[in-house]
Image: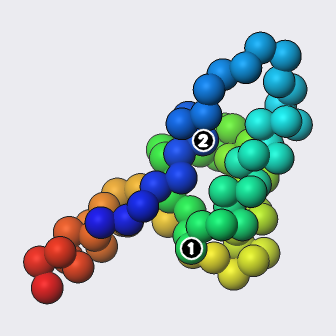
Amino acid sequence: GYPVLNPGRRKQVEGRSWEDWMILGLGDVFAADGVAVLPNWETSRGARLEVHVALELGKPVLPVKVWLARSKVAVQA
């Protein structure tokens, strides 16, 4: 029930640096209403940065399972 901004949707381009990918990923964080985190997200430097930015912007950051459960409840209502 939610539109998803998945960073994996972008074509892998040889030569892009981690910083290049983070610029794109942080753009998604700015555009999103909230962030869904996957298990073990804390082990990813990029995910930690995205979560930090989202929280500083006042956006909800929840496990993907919580977003999915909310979506199912909204569809049933």
The amino acid sitting under disc 2 is Pro
Residue at x-position 77% and y-position 14%: 14
| Residue at the disc numbered 1 | 33
For marks 2 and 1, give the CA distance.
Answer: 15 Å
Left or right: 10, with 4 as reference point = right
**Considering only vertical position in the picture, is 75 above or below 44?**
below
Residue sitting nearer the eye, 13 or 74: 13
**Considering only vertical position in the picture, is 30 above or below 14?**
below
Residue sitting nearer the eye, 77 or 38: 77
Quarter of the image for residue 7 reads top right
Asked if the residue under mark 1 is in contact with the one under mark 2, i.e. CB atoms within 8 Å, the reply is no
Question: Residue most toward the bottom?
Answer: 77
Q: Quadrant of the C terminus?
A: bottom left
* Disc on the earlier residue, 2 or 1: 2
| Residue 55, horizontal then vertical, whole percent | 71, 72
| Residue 44, horizontal then vertical, whole percent | 69, 38
| Residue 34, horizontal then vertical, whole percent | 56, 70
Quarter of the image for residue 43 reads top right
| Residue 8, horizontal then vertical, whole percent | 56, 34
**10 Å crowding of disc 1: few (<14), some (14-19), many (20+):** some
Residue at x-position 56% and y-position 62%: 35
Residue at x-position 86% and y-position 26%: 17
| Residue at the disc numbered 2 | 7
Quarter of the image for residue 59 reads bottom right
Determine the secondary structure under disc 1.
Answer: loop
Determine the secondary structure under disc 2.
Answer: helix
